Structure formats: structure tokens, C-alpha cells
Amino acid sequence: MTTSSTTAAPHASRRPPVRLWRVPVRRVERVTPRMARVTVAGDELADFPAAGTDQNVMLYFYPDGVTLPEPLTLESARAMWSRVRPLTRTYTIRRYDGAACEIDFDFVLHGEHGLASAWAQRVRPGDQVIFVGPSPAYRPAPDVDTYLLAGDETALPAIAAILRELPAGARALVYVEVADAAEQQPLPTAAAAEITWLHRDGRPDLLERAVRSAVLPEDRTEAWVAGERSAVLAVRRHLLDERRLERHRVRPTTYWRRGQSGN
Ligand SMILES: Cc1cc2nc3c(=O)[nH]c(=O)nc-3n(C[C@H](O)[C@H](O)[C@H](O)COP(=O)(O)OP(=O)(O)OC[C@H]3O[C@@H](n4cnc5c(N)ncnc54)[C@H](O)[C@@H]3O)c2cc1C
């Protein structure tokens, strides 16, 4: 099973050039009570190779007070790894606006114990954000009748990007597990999408049970699933072992692991 990034499918686009970006925060807002949107902006983002699809970057978190090389590039950052190595976390590009030179990242606020989550709670306009990427993730295959998208709130930014990309009228069954109704958000799409919000209320196997109940054509279904590792594994097992979907039609990605830091 793929862990922190999906394997490249035959139809995946060529990898865009990866570089290090350092841009200031322009805005911070709450999308929902437990989701913070951090908008970064800078002229250099005019060159950001956004593909209009699901893409992610690796955020770099340096210790406070560290002196960074100038210019800070992927090469100069790596050259100092023996002395200072940043902690990294992966986040999806929720929205890229080339005209405004802006990128939105949406952070699930899961508590003060998470490095990135705690940072997203305290970050302010003007603070610098350093990230490396982009990395392409899922691209929906064209020869598919039904797209199954399943994930928890960490997968919402990716689900939003995938839904935005699906062609008009494409059938999509979408299951999103969130804490409660206040965490639901609009997911605009031209696809014929049936979006089911699952409210957690302490139940561990919501996503798996929802996918089990889905009416899926046996062939020409492509499934994308992302979120907490055990939930992703359970859905993957069901789709491969019980539904007998072809292996290349099932695209699981672990986004986080309970009780374990980082990805
Ligand atoms: C390709 C990819 C794209 C991703 N895109 C996004 C995105 O757009 N938005 C987003 O919010 N996340 C996204 N994630 C998930 C995110 O990277 C992880 O949740 C990450 O662990 C958060 O880092 P942290 O520093 O806040 O917590 P960590 O320091 O990594 O973890 C601290 C503790 O918190 C727990 N934890 C981590 N995440 C969660 C959570 N969501 N809910 C409850 N407990 C948690 C861990 O198990 C650990 O016990 C993505 C991951 C991948 C691989």
C-alpha cells in the first residue's frame, strides 16, 4: 500500500519541477471551527507549476531562531541538513490562484500536540512559510464510470481538488468523515456527485461501513481513499478482497497515523 504519496498511475501527469518556496502569509481564516485556511502570497508564485489537480507540498518547520542561508533554495537548505534539518509535514494545495499569486492550505486543527496543527492556530499574516514541491498526487483516470472518493477531514482539500477536476456529469460517490455537521463545507463540482457526510461521534469504522453500503459497478470503478491509516487499510481491504476491484483501480494513501507524529 502506498503510504505518504500515491503511486504514479499510467495516466499521471509528468512530475512538475520541485523547488523550495518561501512566501509570507497573506490571510488566515477559519473555514469551519476545526479547519484553518492559511493563504500564502508572493510574486514568485506566478511561476508555481500548479496542475489544476490534486497536488501537495512538504512544509518545512525550522527551530525558532535558526539562521537560514541566503538565498534559501532546496540546495542550500539541504547543504545545512547535517546541522539543522527541518521537521516536515505534507499538505495539499487547496487552491492556487496564479493571477493573485496565492495558494490556500487548509489545516485540520486536531490539537496543540501536532506541530503543523499548533502552528496553524497561531500563524499570523506576515509570517514566512517554507515549503517544497509541488508533488503530483491523484489524477482521475478518464476511462471510468464511477469515482469513489473516501476520506476524513485531512483528505477534504484533496477531495475538493479532485471534484473540481472531474468532467461534467461524471458519477462520483463521495464519503467524507468529519467530527460533526459544523465541519461540512461546500465542494463545488461539475460532476454528478453524491456527497455523504459522516459524523464521527466517536465511531471508528464509519468510512468502511459507508463504503460497504455503496452501490458500485464492478468494473470501471476507480476508488481513491485517504486519511487515518487503519481506516484507509480497512477500505482498501474491502475494495480489493470483497469487491474484487482491480488493484490499479484502488488508490489508497495514508495521510496520518494515530499516535504517531509526521508522515
Ligand atoms: C499527501 C498528503 C496530503 C495531506 N494534506 C493535508 C491537508 O491538506 N490538510 C490537513 O490537515 N492534513 C493533510 N495531511 C495530513 C497531515 O499531514 C497529517 O495529519 C500530519 O500528521 C499533521 O501534522 P501535525 O504536525 O499537526 O501532527 P503530528 O505531529 O504529525 O502528530 C501529532 C499527533 O497528532 C495525531 N494526528 C495527526 N493528524 C491528525 C488528525 N488530522 N486528526 C487527529 N489526530 C491527528 C498523530 O497521530 C499524533 O499522535 C496530508 C497528508 C498527506 C500524506
Image (tube, grey):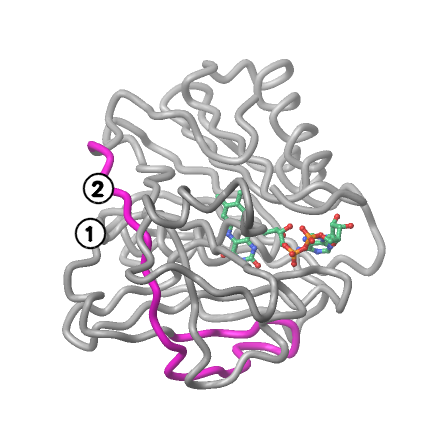
- Report the side of 62 relative to 170 (left or right): right
Task: Please tell me whether the stretch drawn in magenta is mainly helix, strand or loop.
Answer: strand
Amino acid at circle 1: Pro
Check residue 13 for magenta coloring.
no
**Mark 1 or 2 closer to N-term?**
2
Magenta highlight range: 14-39
**Residue 80 x %, y %:** 46, 46
Mark 1–mark 2 distance (CA, rounded to whole Å): 7 Å
- Within 8 Å: ligand 1 and the Cβ of disc 1? no
Residue at 41 percent of width and 25 percent of height: 7
Q: Residue at x 38, y 59 (%)?
A: 69
Rendered-image quadrant of the C terminus? top right
Residue located beneath label 1 in the image: 49
Is 192 placed above or below 105 here? above
- Residue beneath disc 2: 17
In the image, taking residue 127 as reference, residue 181 lies left or right, namely right
